[in-house]
Image (cartoon, helix red, strand yellow):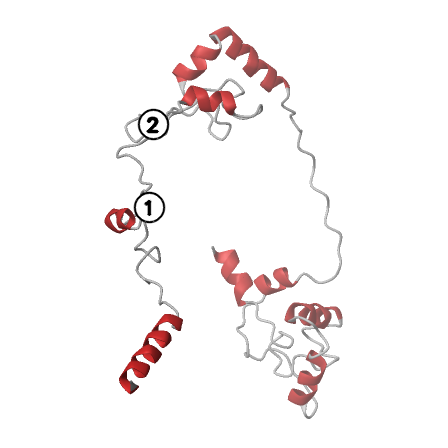
Amino acid sequence: MRLMLCGCALLALAACAPQVPDSGAGIGFDNANLNPQRASAQGFEPVVPAAQSVSSETLATLDATRPSGTAAASGRQVVDASPSNPQPVQLENAGISDENNFDSVGARRSIEDDAKRRAEIASQYQVIQPTALPQRESTGPNIVDYALRSTNPVGNSQYKRFGINGTARSERNCANYPTPDQAQIDFLTRGGPVKDRLGLDPDGDGYACSWDPTPFRAANAN
């Protein structure tokens, strides 16, 4: 009697337990389309397209269904993009000129037309007569002329200088000029190279601050 009661209890538990779904049926890559045997066993009809199946639409059909304004509807030829087709010839390419191609130009216009066109272009030329160069107004000493007239190198004393702390004074006053050229112009304007009122030329070589006449001489030699 006890064994009979245990057997009934086990049967009741087995009937209440949920069934585990078959994880291989219709999940992932093992679906009805890719596994015809399993689909047939489960009552499904596999949906597989026939081999070498292609669309029956033609280029003419596609062209007729295109909206107005497209390349095909505008009257241009539809090119079948097949690897076996030859490369289409590009026409009306505005980025490339064929004016140097005699055959292309000759096919478009005659020699008379070309001569007329060249005459029209020549009539638009404007000849500007040269005029006299303006005279340079004197704005002060010419440092280029001074560099070519002087012959001593930088640091070779030519003029007497007096005073103490000449180097410190020169450095302080030279800092007031944005360029050595402007310092040399002001130096010559104030009586240089003989006189050095601001102490811009402490060594007496005739060149204020760090101005160097060598580049001007080298340019004149070439």
Quarter of the N terminus within the rendering = bottom left
- Residue density around tag 2, few if under 14, some if 14–19, many if 20 or more, within 10 Å: few
Q: Residue at x 47, y 55 (%)?
A: 222
Q: Nearer the viewer, mark 1 or mark 2?
A: 1
Residue annotated with mark 2 = 87
**Sequence-wise first label, 1 or 2:** 1
- Residue 201 pos. (x, y %): 65, 79
Q: Is residue 29 or residue 22 the one in the foreground?
A: 22
One can see residue 2 in this view: yes
Q: Residue at x 73, y 70 (%)?
A: 186
SS at circle 2: loop
Label 1, label 2: how far apart the Cα atoms are? 49 Å
Figure check: 89 above or below 1: above
Q: Residue furthest left?
A: 37
Q: Tell me where residue 157 sits by quadrant.
A: bottom right
Q: Residue at x 64, y 21 (%)?
A: 124
Figure check: 110 above or below 91: above
One can see residue 98 in this view: no
- Residue 106 pos. (x, y %): 43, 12
Q: Amino acid at mark 1?
A: Phe
- Residue density around tag 1, few if under 14, some if 14–19, many if 20 or more, within 10 Å: few
Residue annotated with mark 1 = 44
Q: Amino acid at mark 2?
A: Gln
Q: Tell me where residue 129 sits by quadrant.
A: top right
Q: Is residue 181 left or right of residue 65?
A: right
